[in-house]
Amino acid sequence: MRVSAVLPVLVSGILVGGPATGYDGPFYQQLALPVLRIATNTEVVARATEIRLTRDRMEQHYRIDSVGSAALPLWLYFPLEPIDRWHADNVDAFGPGIAADPLALTATMDGAPFPFSVDARATFLGMDVSAHLANAGLPLLPFGAETSAALEKLAPDAKSDLAERGILTHWGPMWQLETAYAARFDFAAGAAHDLVVAYRPVFGEYVESLIMLDGKLTFGLDEESYDFLCLTEPQLQEIDKRFAARKDEEPYRPYTIADISMNLAAANEQYGSLYDLDFTVETRKPSDILATCGGEFEKVGPTTYRWKAEFADEQPELKLFFLEAVE
């Protein structure tokens, strides 16, 4: 499908990734939703997972049981997918300090504040290049005003070294920011603990949308397939009604499309399913549509979709598409 990209901007002989758009409008890159990972131990297990997602907020509730006979200290993690220069257009969707806290994450354990520390590093082809960037006076984030300013001041020998390594090219910064939230907790023997984590989700947004050309539903002016949206037959019927109401306008785009994804996995990697899953997604208004690739969501209210299961298989590539009605 046709999208515009984060195009390079020439700065002091080095092309720097910065937001730019093609003729068909901006494209915003989503960041996959992180989920809890618990250091492997069979005596501590997440017995219930409750998820609440809106366009503005993600909340994850975990009931964690410690079934051992002794107190057990373990680490909890929320690893993020890498952030690279292709996220530059979407910079405003992140937390105020991307490198320090990309999602503005907060948490409580048993009702009390439970702070997570942030571990961040820059990588290139799987290698940690944080030290190389620090020596050159560059930040870990591969885009943004601070990075652009630092590139302007980059010493010739540092520029040459980074270019020789391939970390900095005529296309701009080639490194990515890898981030993980981590916290240590002492699990009491035979006790249950309630962890609640909230953060700001980073949604993507598509350049094109569904249109009707010569009576045929398609995606964009290139008439591409819309199968990737995983729309159900009732949803397609609802979409057809919106087109029928505006049949004199062609091409008419009744929806903007935002997306987000996640690897929905058990917090304990030794278990292959999620216990007592309750996953609710809210759209902004009743005329919006939630399309899902994976999961077993049902529409249970005007703006509410729910997937509830005593045992749910892990979803390595759960995709959610928010078709937001243009009124």
Image: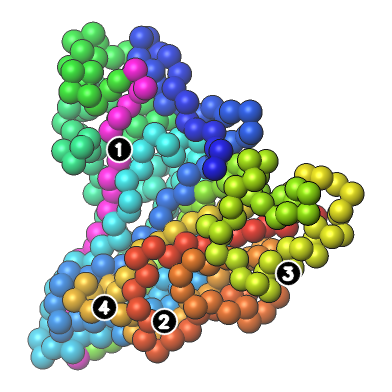
Question: What numbered label is drawn on residue 277?
Answer: 2
Q: CA distance from mark 3 to mark 2?
A: 30 Å
Q: Which mark is residue 272?
A: 4
Q: Earlier in the sequence, mark 1 or mark 2?
A: 1
Query: In screen coordinates, is 258 left or right of 34?
Result: right
Where residue 256 appears, as percent x and y from the top left, is 66, 51
Neighbor class of circle 4 (other Cα within 10 Å; few <14, some 14-19, many 20+) is some
State left or right for residue 213 relative to residue 112: right
User: Which element type, helix, strand or loop, lies under badge 2?
Assistant: strand
Query: What residue type is disc 3 on?
Result: Gln
How far is disc 4 from disc 2 in space, using C-alphas?
13 Å
Query: Which range of residues does the magenta coloring cover?
Result: 170-190
Q: Position of residue 38 (x, y in %)?
A: 22, 70
Instruction: Name above or below for residue 10 compared with residue 110.
Output: above
The amino acid on which the numbered mark 1 sits, given as a three-letter code, is Gln
**Could one spot residue 152 in this view of the protein?**
no
Q: Which residue is mark 3?
A: 237
